[in-house]
Image (cartoon, rainbow, N blue to C red):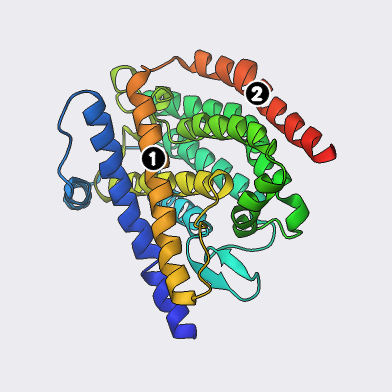
Amino acid sequence: MAWLEILAFITVPGILFIISMALFIDWLDRKVYARGQNRRGPPFFQPLYDLVKLTAKESIIPEGVSKFWMTVLPILFFWTALTGALMIPIAVFSDDLNVVTGFAGFHFDVFFVLLVLLSYGMLIFAMGYVTKNPFAQTGATRSLLQVLSFEIPLSFAIFVPILITSDKTERFVLGDVSKNLYSAIGETPLYIIGLIIAFAISILALMAELEEFPFDAPVAHTELADGWLVEYGGWRYALIHLGERIGAFFIGGLIVTLFLGGPYIVDTSIPFLDAFLHIIFFTIKLILVITLMSFLRTLISRIRIDQTVRLSWRFVLPFALIAIMLTLGFKLI
């Protein structure tokens, strides 16, 4: 059985599946964004071509900048995104947890994902700061401010589905939340109110984590010449770009897991068929989430970083608190 687990870890739904989905998400995001602007968009294999082209280009280290940190930080960024992606429950069956879970899933992993998200933002800040470029450092500071502003409302939003399913699990595993979400809402339909509010907040917060429109102030091309990315090129830029797309898979998969029931829709009690259907259902839900996020960024132009912070603290956070209070109220009732 061990060799089957190793094979799955490498192929489907493991590392190769995640990287393939990351490239597909890159194409889907650019395609939806282009169609929203009445353009054709890139061909299907364009993200792969871009990655190969970037890898072949020269990677230059600016004078007086630490080569060690400009090499290590992109690698850490890539592995942080990949670690988060491996925690998403897709189709891996664990006898220990007795639930569909990710390769990196474990007890109380719903709280660990918050650390992964925060680390993701902190590494972006570090990558921009070590370059000693004023544009990059300004973009890195904006990125850190944006991440910290949305981290608290995002945490509250994530706790809503956890609270909804808390009566059905004591392990706080991502797979448990997705498995029990539909049944919990079926027993108490009023939970759907807080869940919808939390879902909307999560979409906004995670768009800010990915620095997508309208939250792209940290990498504003017209103001900061690509922000914290300005000094990275060649294989380093390729690794960061792939890490960003894997991060989109992780973040989109987190929304699917916590708010859309993850890979679950039906249970045939046939292991191989269930595993196949889990991958299909998860992929369809992920495509819907990414399409929604891509469509939203076509509707709104960039907002300033002060407007982003004001939006988070004045509007997003109060609604996150309302979602938590409604969920707790319905649970007590």
Please give the name of the residue rendered at 34% of the width and 57% of the height, measured from the top-left corner. Answer: 19
Q: Which residue is mark 1?
A: 290
Q: Nearer the viewer, residue 198 or 182?
A: 182
Q: Nearer the viewer, residue 68 or 170?
A: 170
User: How far across and down, in percent of the image, does residue 50 sit?
Assistant: 19, 46
Q: Secondary structure at mark 2?
A: helix
Residue type at mark 2? Phe
Q: Quadrant of residue 211?
A: top left
Q: Residues within 10 Å of mark 1 (few under 14, many from 20)?
A: many
Asked if residue 2 shows in the view, the reply is yes
Q: Nearer the viewer, residue 268 or 320?
A: 268
Q: Quadrant of residue 329?
A: top right
User: How far across and down, in percent of the image, does residue 65 sit?
Assistant: 38, 39
Q: Quadrant of residue 314?
A: top right
Q: Residues within 10 Å of mark 2 (few under 14, many from 20)?
A: many
Please give the name of the residue rendered at 49% of the width and 76% of the height, measured from the top-left corner. Answer: 270
Q: Which residue is mark 2?
A: 319
Judge whether 304 appears above or below 97 on screen: above
